[in-house]
Image (cartoon, grey):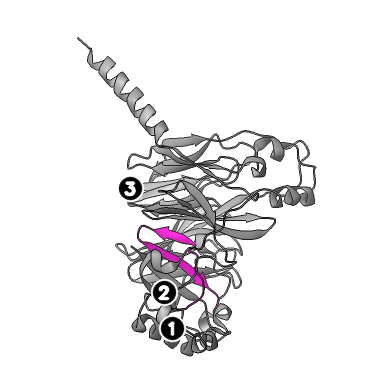
């Protein structure tokens, strides 16, 4: 008869084998790219355009998506151009500026806002500020409430009333783990995904921080750590990171050995990075895993077809071809389950109205007359000097 401990042991072994079998390899290469169009109508149920109100008190641009947040009733954006954090309602009407640029505890320095969150339940805005590292709390009118310190290396990507979810940039193999779960007193509860160690032989004098690829799908966070680790993890409810995809870039991988042996200048480092495939934006649907990566400082768009088990590059310089309402081609900056979000500067819509008017076959658009008319109305409302437009797509 098996003892209970032995039964548990065999269950753990079976789970490990099962998890390993479920890992899917996705090969990305600049060599022999197979091209295939991806159409928006194949993915979405609807599309919504939200132009952010333009006025003298809320002129913004260059929205940094990692420091922005969208809730049921509000849109919070960080403008790196003006170093402002601004709150709009869900229809795009300006509500308040949250905090101010400055050196006081209630303020933030330029380029120091790492992430921001809307806590509607407590009617608060929470900002993770880098210099010095802390969380600042404000009410929904922008009034400063309080501040509490955070570990300097931490990048907070989510938090609840009970937990803080943290990731890190790989700085020569430090810290030892890339992800941490903390309680609200910032005590570490769990650590996941060991950092890949390397040491640059000649210090280049600059700190390079790469954005991590992340998205929320099927109720779970999915993460791929910066440039060295080739694995995309699904985060379980118990903060267990399970490998789901391996992104194989072959000779285009920014490996630890390449990073360690780069010449000791910033120029040499950027030459190395531009010669590697750098995965940036990702999102997932039932049928596809879609990836935007940079190579030679240029974006490329592709998708992995789960049924065919193949990667196809999209023949577009801007993303998914919009055959839904005739609008601009689209690529999301982040995914929250069935919703895809992206901010587009207003100048991207220049010339779109004349393009629609001259469309030889508007009946080919799949969104129907209401969707086409909605997009035309948007173009009438904005010009090149308007604030950015938030595009919200609901996937099937």
Describe the element under mark 2 as helix, strand or loop. Answer: loop
- Dividing the picture into quadrants, the one containing residue 367 is bottom left
Real-space Cα separation, disc 1 to disc 3, in angstroms: 51 Å
* Foreground pick, 365 / 52: 365
Describe the element under mark 1 as helix, strand or loop. Answer: helix
Q: Is residue 139 visible?
A: no
Residue holding disc 3: 162
Real-space Cα separation, disc 3 to disc 2, in angstroms: 41 Å
Real-space Cα separation, disc 1 to disc 2, in angstroms: 10 Å
Q: What x and y, as percent, mark residue 256?
A: 66, 36
Describe the element under mark 3 as helix, strand or loop. Answer: loop
Foreground: disc 1 or disc 2: 1
For marks 1 and 2, the one nearer the N-term is 2
Residue located at (66% from left, 34% from top): 198
Q: Is residue 337 above or below residue 45?
A: above
Residue located at (46% from left, 46% from top): 309
Horizontal placement of 139 versus 59: left or right?
left
Q: Is residue 219 above or below residue 92?
A: above
Which label is found at residue 324? Answer: 2
Residue holding disc 1: 362
Q: What x and y, as percent, mark residue 217?
A: 37, 53
Q: Is residue 386 above or below residue 35?
A: below
Question: In the image, which residues are magenta?
Answer: 327-345
Residue located at (32% from left, 65% from top): 120
Q: What x and y, as percent, mark residue 83?
A: 58, 69
């Amino acid at each position: 008869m098996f003892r209970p401990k032995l039964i548990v042991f065999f269950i753990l072994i079976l789970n490990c084998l099962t998890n390993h079998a479920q890992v899917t390899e996705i090969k990305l290469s600049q060599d022999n790219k197979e091209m295939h169009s991806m159409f928006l109508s194949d993915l979405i149920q609807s599309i919504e355009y939200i132009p952010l109100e333009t006025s003298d008190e809320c002129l913004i641009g260059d929205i940094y998506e990692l420091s922005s947040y969208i809730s049921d009733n509000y849109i919070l954006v960080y403008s790196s151009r003006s170093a402002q954090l601004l709150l709009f309602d869900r229809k795009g009407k300006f509500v308040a500026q949250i905090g101010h640029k400055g050196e006081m505890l209630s303020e933030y320095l330029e380029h120091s806002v790492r992430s921001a969150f809307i806590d509607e339940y407590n009617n608060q805005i929470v900002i993770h500020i880098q210099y010095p590292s802390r969380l600042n709390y404000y009410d929904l009118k922008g009034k400063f409430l309080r501040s509490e310190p955070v570990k300097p290396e931490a990048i907070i990507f989510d938090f609840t009333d009970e937990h803080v979810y943290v990731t890190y940039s790989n700085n020569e193999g430090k810290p030892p783990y890339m992800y941490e779960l903390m309680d609200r007193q910032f005590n570490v509860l769990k650590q996941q995904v060991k950092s890949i160690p390397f040491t640059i032989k000649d210090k280049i004098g600059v700190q390079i921080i790469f954005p991590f690829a992340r998205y929320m799908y099927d109720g779970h966070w999915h993460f791929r750590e910066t440039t060295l680790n080739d694995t995309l993890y699904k985060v379980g409810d118990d903060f267990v990171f399970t490998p789901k995809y391996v992104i194989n870039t072959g000779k285009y991988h920014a490996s630890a050995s390449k990073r360690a042996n780069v010449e000791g200048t910033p120029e040499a480092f950027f030459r190395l990075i531009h010669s590697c495939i750098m995965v940036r934006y990702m999102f997932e649907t039932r049928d596809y895993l879609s990836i935007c990566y940079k190579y030679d400082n240029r974006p490329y768009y592709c998708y992995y077809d789960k049924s065919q088990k193949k990667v196809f590059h999209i023949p577009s310089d801007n993303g998914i071809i919009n055959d839904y309402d005739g609008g601009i081609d689209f690529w999301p900056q982040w995914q929250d389950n069935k919703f895809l979000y992206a901010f587009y500067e207003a100048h991207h819509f220049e010339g779109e109205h004349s393009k629609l008017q001259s469309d030889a076959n508007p009946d080919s658009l799949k969104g129907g007359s209401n969707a086409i008319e909605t997009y035309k109305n948007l173009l009438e409302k904005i010009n090149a000097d308007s604030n950015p437009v938030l595009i919200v797509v609901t996937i099937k």
